[in-house]
Amino acid sequence: MSNSPEKKKSKILRIAISGKSGCGNTTVSRLVSQKLGIKMVNYTFRNLAEDEGVSFEEIRRRAELNDEIDRLVDHRQMEMAMQGSCILGSRLAIWMLHEADLRVYLNVNLEERIRRIQKREGGNIEQRMQETVERDQLDHERYLRIYGINNDMFSFADIIINSSRLEAEQVANLIIGAIPKEHLEALAQYKPEKK
């Protein structure tokens, strides 16, 4: 968390939330966004596929062959995040959003992540376990290759939440509780009225 005078007086609040698939990142980011009344940024391969008019599988295939796909998604995400106050929820948010006022890492054990993914996407546990372990490895290798980021090294985050046994609402409340008071006050003071 930055303590610079400029940041303390800022009307802008940016929170970066990261974690691996199945950690609850999107759900928690959405809840924090709703509770604070600020936009959520979560631009993904799925969004790019929609923008390009192709299938998600096609974008994933392209990304395997071309690192520019990752760079494009991350660039668009950063552009959106820099437009004002936001909750940026993405696998690399805490590494990429240098202007974040709060960096949060959601750490969930593999078994719980698998359970959540299987509940969300169906299939059997063994299938989801194999896919998730492979995806984790591919993501790790890709982030190292493209950005030099080791996504297993997150100790620099302002807060690390083991959300394996917590409900999303509890995690969102912990994050909001960690926001420096001056940021919450500035956000409340300058929040546009809803019509």
Image (cartoon, grey):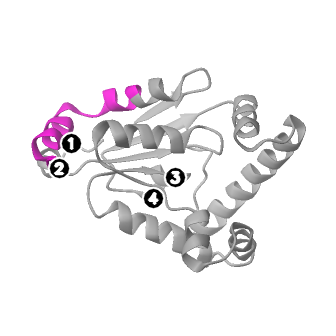
CA distance separating discs 1 and 3: 24 Å
Mark 1 surroundings within 10 Å by alpha-carbon count, few (fewer than 14), some (14 through 19), many (20 or more): few
- Specify the farthest residue to the front: 195
Front-most of residues 188 and 10: 188
Mark 4 surroundings within 10 Å by alpha-carbon count, few (fewer than 14), some (14 through 19), many (20 or more): some
| Left or right position of 56 against 38 | right
Whichever of labels 4 and 3 marks the residue nearer the N terminus, that label is 3
Which image quadrant is residue 3 in? top left
Whichever of labels 3 and 2 marks the residue nearer the N terminus, that label is 3
Q: Which residue is mark 4?
A: 96
Residue at 45% x, 58% y is 96
CA distance separating discs 4 and 3: 10 Å
Looking at the image, do the residues carrying marks 4 and 3 touch, with CB atoms under 8 Å apart? yes
Mark 2 surroundings within 10 Å by alpha-carbon count, few (fewer than 14), some (14 through 19), many (20 or more): few
Q: Nearer the viewer, mark 2 or mark 4?
A: 2
Q: Nearer the viewer, mark 4 or mark 3?
A: 3
Residue 195: numbered disc? 2
Front-most of residues 57 and 104: 57
Whichever of labels 1 and 2 marks the residue nearer the N terminus, that label is 1
Residue 189 picture location, percent across and down: 10, 41
